[in-house]
């Protein structure tokens, strides 16, 4: 089976990180798993792209970063026609528009698409007109996408209710945010600093609007003591604005923006609590890493999966999305008691080793159903020759 994964670039992001790990794992298992990238920019190229063969279209003389989705829609069809994969892997919500475009542009020649739902579908952060438009867009996805994957129990109900997939094909595959070896490393990194003055709070995430770091900074300013500190790991378009906000709130000397750091969870072992302030999420990989480390969690109820992820409150405290006062009250009460064994058990449910096999089962079921309705294959053509082991940019 040939499974084609398409990503914009190596720019840091939870969706892209998980997709790259899956591609590498599938190849280790002997699966033909080509990777298409719209461009090769990004910090994760050195971290996760090293020795990972990938395919890049000819690049123009100008940057395509500002319209990367349109660029992928323009360049991906030719690669699909040339390589004739058995299935397409849509790695997250942000790539659904590309998947639907492939269905429209290629018609019956488009392979079946398996899409992972990586973010909350309710999107209560949107104003009413935008939310209604988004729900219509979900219905469009349900019409064209062949198989959906929910990343945790509870999310499948959202998919069924809001996307209403025509084929009713939905699997639950715990998000492969961790590996067994990574969990062992993270657990070993847990070293509470008993002699430290003040509390240490940590957060990991892209500095983008979705993550609502302003809420976290406001809550920290309200509830933190004079010797408390907050470390924020990650980078993104909001960094300068967040640094300015910290200055205005008078906490700049107690908040450090660490930038992009490979495996940041290895550096949070001395923290007292992990903070998550997002407006919406699917299954946050950073939260799973914090559970693997053994940290108590304070998080917004930004996903239908959050309650099950935190063991109905046993592994952390959930607060309403956007409520700075409740977030600050939870922060004031930290550190919270934590069941270390339960935290570790929860993290172990979300491993690459388990998810890889489950994904392959879902791909097999999806392509078998497609073959039954189209005996000559997804493209209506005889089986093709292997893809050359490496195709880089033609520029």
Image (spheres, helix red, strand yellow):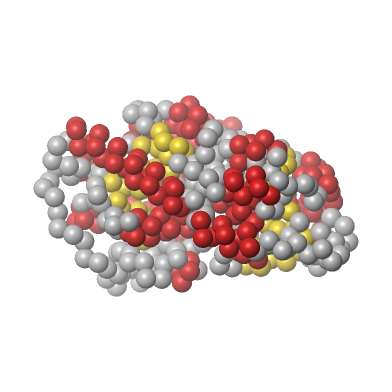
Q: Is residue 148 left or right of residue 156?
A: left
Residue 139 location in percent, x, y?
42, 31
Write down the quadrant of residue 97 in the picture: top left
Question: Going 56% across and 67% down the picture, which residue do you hit?
Answer: 262
Q: Is residue 303 above or below residue 287?
A: above
Nearest the viewer among 62 and 215 is 215
Quadrant position of the C terminus in the picture? bottom left
Q: Is residue 376 left or right of residue 157?
A: left
Please identify the quarter of the rendering in which residue 202 is found: bottom right
In the current view of this chain or complex, which residue is farthest to the left? 382
- Residue at 48% x, 33% y is 156
Q: Is residue 234 visible?
A: no
**Residue at the right extreme?**
226
Residue 43 image offset from top left, x and y in percent = 50, 68
- Quarter-of-image position of residue 61: bottom left
Residue located 62% across and 49% down the image: 344
Give whichever of 324, 376 is nearer the camera.
376
Residue placed at 50% from the left, 56% from the top? 179
């Amino acid at each position: 089976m040939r499974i084609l994964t398409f990503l914009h670039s190596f720019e840091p992001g939870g969706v892209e990180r998980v997709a790259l790990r899956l591609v590498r794992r599938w190849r280790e298992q002997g699966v033909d798993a080509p990777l298409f990238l719209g461009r090769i920019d990004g910090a994760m190229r050195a971290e996760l792209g090293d020795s990972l063969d990938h395919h890049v279209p000819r690049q123009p003389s100008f940057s395509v970063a500002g319209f990367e989705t349109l660029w992928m829609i323009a360049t991906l069809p030719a690669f699909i026609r040339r390589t004739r994969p058995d299935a397409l892997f849509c790695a997250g919500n942000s790539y659904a528009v590309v998947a639907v475009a492939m269905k429209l542009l290629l018609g019956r020649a488009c392979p079946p698409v398996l899409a992972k739902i990586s973010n909350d579908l309710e999107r209560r952060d949107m104003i009413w007109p935008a939310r209604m438009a988004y729900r219509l867009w979900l219905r469009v996805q349900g019409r064209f996408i062949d198989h959906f994957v929910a990343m945790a129990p509870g999310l499948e109900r959202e998919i069924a209710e809001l996307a209403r997939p025509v084929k009713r094909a939905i699997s639950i595959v715990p998000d492969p945010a961790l590996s067994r070896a990574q969990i062992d490393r993270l657990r070993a990194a847990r070293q509470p600093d008993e002699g430290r003055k003040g509390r240490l709070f940590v957060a990991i995430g892209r500095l983008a609007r979705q993550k609502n770091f302003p809420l976290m900074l406001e809550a920290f300013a309200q509830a933190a003591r004079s010797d408390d500190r907050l470390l924020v790991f990650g980078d993104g378009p909001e960094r300068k604005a967040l640094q300015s906000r910290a200055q205005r709130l008078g906490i700049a000397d107690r908040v450090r923006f660490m930038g992009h750091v490979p495996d940041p969870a290895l550096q949070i072992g001395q923290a007292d609590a992990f903070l998550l302030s997002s407006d919406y999420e699917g299954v946050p990989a950073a939260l799973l890493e914090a559970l693997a480390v053994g940290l108590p969690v304070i998080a917004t109820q930004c996903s239908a999966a959050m309650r099950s992820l935190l063991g109905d409150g046993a592994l952390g405290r959930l607060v309403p999305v956007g409520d700075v006062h409740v977030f600050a009250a939870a922060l004031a009460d930290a550190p919270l008691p934590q069941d270390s064994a339960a935290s570790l058990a929860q993290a172990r449910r979300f491993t690459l080793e388990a998810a890889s096999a489950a994904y392959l089962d879902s791909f097999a079921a999806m392509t078998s159903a497609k073959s039954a309705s189209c005996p000559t294959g997804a493209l209506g053509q005889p089986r093709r020759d292997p893809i050359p082991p490496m195709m880089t940019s033609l520029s």
